[in-house]
Image (cartoon, rainbow, N blue to C red):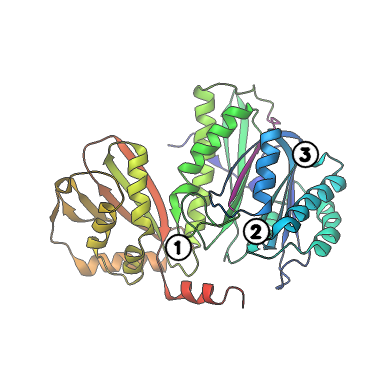
Amino acid sequence: MADWQKITGGITAPRGYQAAGITAGLKPSGLPDLALIFSDVEAIAAGVFTTSQVKAACVDYCRQRLQAKHSARAILCNAGQANAATGNQGWFDALESGMAVAQALNIPSESVLLASTGVIGQRIKMDALRSGIPKLVAALSETGSDAAAGAIITTDLVPKSIALETTIGDRPVRIGGIAKGSGMIHPNMATMLAFVTCDAAVSPGLWQQMLARAADRSFNSITVDGDTSTNDSLIALANGQSRTPAITEVGAESERLEAMLTAVCQHLAKAIARDGEGATCLIEVEVTGAHDELSARQIAKTIAGSSLVKSAIFGRDPNWGRIAAAAGRAGVLFEQENLQIKLGNFLMLENGQPLTFDRAAASAYLKQAAMGAYLQEDTVLISVSVGNGYGVGKAWGCDLSYDYVRINAEYTT
């Protein structure tokens, strides 16, 4: 049983945070497109960013800020323009964005972090952003999480938010998060933005390590379409407003906090995979018996990202051969005679030998998952064992439907 409970409030559930989301005119649709997260005090900051060599200006901006200073008070996020592959002017736009929000908040520009999402190659509409920032700051609220979550999305069908609470040192500690992501999703971060707030006090190095491990077990273990974005950013703040003793070294308290941080990230990651463009169900792959966790995750991610596996699940075809083929090409050594595959409760392969199973019932299982979309009952479980090792890993993805092609064919038109 988890050592925490789910609470309401999203990113403003932890003490000492405000958030806002408004329509500034950045999106042609007229939907909300500018969000702000603000800590009442300077907070320890950590980040994990895209591995792409083509990076948005906001990614370079945040990396420079976090290398020079491991703290921040504000995160500004615009939706509509990715400000990626926009040259020197895109960099100057990022700098101006940071300075504009810092001036409006009366804080140093070094305490502002940035994120952008939208169409690659398009600069931020700076006139709209300049006029929107004062309205955004005026809209800051301790109940503004939902507004911020709604303002960072692009092709998402639903906003994504979570907040959890545990006890450390006899005092409540909370972590909240919001995220966006629907397409261009693949391990090593994906077209996704995620922002996490925490009211514990944690040393900078430890907070960064916690976040990196949580990212590996969540956002780096989801895939929708195999494409990695230019803008991927996971930013986490810890402001110490819970008034609990500072966590400065590895121990029971740090492990408790990291477990809750991982749970927040996994919830948001699964919400992104569940909301994959055109998806009808979430796919969860668990691999056991590998040499180590990294190997298990590598196999799981390969299966979850296989277009053939994803297509079969969309077609409600319990074709376990595609799962076996994906596991075999994952680049992890294992003995074929040790391979076991289950789809839900249907055991299909054991000790490398195919078994007889009820194909109609297995197909019905896949159909049932599609019918449960967005009800948290839409998960197709794939369980794979590759041996007797201690390595266990999970990955999440979604099925591949006709609508995925339609949505991305029409993305800029």
Q: What kind of element bears circle 2? A: loop
| The residue positioned farthest toward the front in the image shown | 88
From the viewer's perspective, tell me whether residue 102 is left or right of residue 155: right
Q: Which mark is residue 110?
A: 3
Residue drawn at x 35%, y 54% is 302
Marks 3 and 2, how far apart at CA: 21 Å
Q: Within the image, what quadrant is residue 176 found in?
A: top right
Q: Which mark is residue 369?
A: none
Q: Which mark is residue 84?
A: 2
**Amino acid identity at mark 2:** Ala
Q: Which residue is mark 1?
A: 225
- Label 3 or label 2, whichever lies nearer to me, is 2
Marks 2 and 1, how far apart at CA: 20 Å
**Mark closest to the chain's N terminus, 3 or 1:** 3
**Mark closest to the chain's N terminus, 2 or 1:** 2
**Range shown magenta:** 232-242
From the viewer's perspective, tell me whether residue 123 is left or right of residue 306: right
**Residue 234 highlighted magenta (yes or no):** yes
Q: Quadrant of the C terminus?
A: bottom right
**Amino acid identity at mark 1:** Asp
Q: What kind of element bears circle 1? A: loop
Q: Nearer the viewer, residue 168 or 197?
A: 197
Q: What kind of element bears circle 3? A: helix
Q: Position of residue 97 (x, y in %)?
A: 79, 52
